[in-house]
Structures are given as C-alpha cells and as structure tokens.
Amino acid sequence: MAVKVEEAFDLIYKNVSGGFLKIVPLEQALGFILAKDLFATHNLPPYDNSAMDGYAAKISDSGSCVVVNHTIFAGDNSDKELSAGFAIKIMTGAKIPLATQCIVPNEDVIACQMGVKLPDNLVISKHIRLLGEDIKSGDLLLKTGTKLGAYQIALLASQGISHVQVYKKPKVALFASGSELKMHFETIEPFQLYNTNTPTFFARAQELGCEVEFIGTAHDSLEDIRKHIKSALTCDLIVTSGGVSVGDADYTKEAFAPFGYEIFFDKIDIKPGKPTTFGRIENTYVLNLPGNPLAAALNFELFGSSIILALSGDTSKYLHFIKAKMKEEYLIKAGKRTLVPGFFDGEYFTPCEKFAPGMIMPLATSNAFIMVDEACSSLACGSYVKVLSTRFSFTSLKRVSLVSN
C-alpha cells in the first residue's frame, strides 16, 4: 500500500542519521558540517584599534591646532601615550596609543603650523574599535550541525583555528538498471536509450555536498543487479533508477532481497513517482527511484535530498520553500498529490507548459517545482504557492508543510 508523502518523510527522519567523524584542515572545510561546538579563545579585536586612517586625539583638544610628532602603522607595537595638545597620526587597524579618546579621520582635519587643526565637538570613542566588541574570549562561535561556508571559515580563521572536527560527507553510490540503457559515451542502437538519470543524480548529489561513486548500468537480470548492489554497499546511500515498478523485467527490489533489504516504504501516493522505494541494508540506505527521468528527478529532490540532509549531520535538515504567487491560473486534476515543475522568477511561479514523467526538457528549463494538494483542482492567478527550488538549497531547523493548495 502506498504511503502518504508525510509518512514517507516520517520514515526518512526516523531512520536516517549521520555521525561519522573526521578532522580536516580549515582550507578543506568548505561544505562540511561541524561536529563539535567551537568557542572563542581570543578577543576580537584583540586590542583597541583605529577604524580609520586619521589622528588619535583627546576630547579636550576639540577645535584646537595640535602638534603631530609621531605615526603608528598597523602592526606596530607602540608604547606611545597621548598627551593634551598633541595628536598621533594612525592607520586603520593600528593599536591606539594610551590615553586616546577618539580617532579623527584624515578628511576631518585641516593642516596647521606644527600639525593639524581638529574639528569642534569631538565624540568620545569615535572611530575606535574596542577590544572584544565583536567576539569575546569564551563566546560560542559555531554550534554542532552548522554547515561551513566561506564566512563561517572566516570566523574560525579569526581565532587561529587550523583544524576542525566535522561529519564525513555522505557517500552516494549510483547505478541504473535497464538493458535498453547506454551511457552517453557509448554508441546506441535505434531501439536503445541514453542513461540520463545516473549523470543527473551524480551531478545533483555533488551539488548537495556528497562524495559520489558511479557503479555502472546493470542489465535486467538478478545476477547483474546483485553484482552492482554488492559493489555499492560500502557507501552510505545507494540510489537506483528503473526496475522498481511491476513489469516482468523489473528486478530491482527482488535483487536487493538476499542482502537483508529492510524496506521502509515501497510506494508513495504521489504523481509522478509512485513506485519510489526506500529501505536499508545494515548501515547503507537505499533509494529506488522510477526510471522515467522527470518522475525520478522530482522524487529525488523531495526524498533523496531529505535522506542526504539527514545523513550529513546538518541541524537544518528539513526542506523549506519560497513563497511565490502564481503567474496565471493553473488547472489540475484533483485526487492525487501532484508535483508540478516550473519557473520561479523571484516573485511569480509559472508551471511548465508541457511536461510528463518521461520527459527531460522540463528539468533543464525549470528551476523549481510545487507539490499540489490532492484536494486541489485549480490554483488561481496571484494565489500563493510553496515553491521548492531545484537550483538552490533552502532548509529549515524545523519541519514545515511543503504542500500548496
């Protein structure tokens, strides 16, 4: 019996978790998920420093012509102390001299005899970056489950952190089944097809931060499919396409049985993509997708992405949507939870004019899709829908409904 979409998600989140650890240098940490809370060991800034190229001054010297007899550059370890009637020229980032009360930018002073004339009404601490105003020693920098991007790496570099403990990236194995399929680098006969699903999932899994292995294309025989399964069991997730419906030559689920395949669900009440199967062989998860390219890709976006997020250790592991308005009225046959590909322009969502489970062009021309409630028969022009992007990753710390109605 087919499970509801929400039941499929329940089974994924209940059964999938990450947890394998490794330590990587900071230069190689991009895209990994942090596996340990990190705390600051240094104040940032580590000392009071100048936010501008200008002059260190005292408030009591407002409007006065002061003597300038010293310059401090960034990186200088100066022990100068500022006295009344004097200013010290200073560069951005330089440690401010003792007794400084403010920094006056170059453009706010006028040259005068022996130095510069300061403006009236100087303000205490103006243009001074105070010790620890950004980060204080002991502050929590990043929490476990945080994905490391460029700016998180910048934060860690500011603390002199050279290595971090992270979760290993999910390792995904891919193979297709079908004697009619050939790879794009092979010659095909008039009665054969190019295998588009495996290159699609290979690229998409890489976009989602996985390490990916291509096992090959299996012929429609139990022996050959089992050979491919055995080769893939060192990975965290096996993704197959084709051979999961009820045709005479659909051997995939039968081929997995001798390996102790525990099936969590083998059909989903969704259109397209009903014959989507998810299970586990010991520590390796298995996602069997339909052979039709559009059906396989859209279900990979929903369920494959969710499995990968759960495996990654990311605390923001739930798919999220972008709220958009329908560009035009859209009529749909009610009775089945339906996936509709289309294009999101930043404000409006426009469904593809023509699409079917076996098509490929809609995948290339669309950048998103919606999941329409089974009770819905039309979406009015200007009505709000929940758009799921196929080009960017939008996730949430909490699970939300992804259904448009």
Image (cartoon, rainbow, N blue to C red):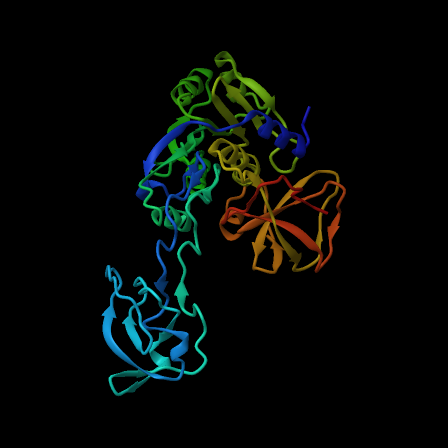
Vertical relation: 52 (above or below) 310: below
Q: Which sits in the foreground, 208 or 349? A: 208
In what quadrant of the picture does the N terminus appear? Answer: top right
Q: Which sits in the foreground, 201 or 140? A: 140
Q: Position of residue 140 (x, y in %)?
A: 47, 43
Q: Position of residue 132 (x, y in %)?
A: 42, 54
Q: Which sits in the foreground, 184 or 386? A: 386
Q: Position of residue 337 (x, y in %)?
A: 69, 39
Q: Residue furthest front?
A: 84
Q: Is residue 164 visible?
A: yes
Vertical relation: 158 (above or below) 117: above
Q: How many marks?
A: 0
In the image, taking residue 68 as reference, residue 123 lies left or right, namely: right
Q: Quadrant of residue 271?
A: top right
Q: Quadrant of residue 373?
A: top right
Vertical relation: 279 (above or below) 318: above
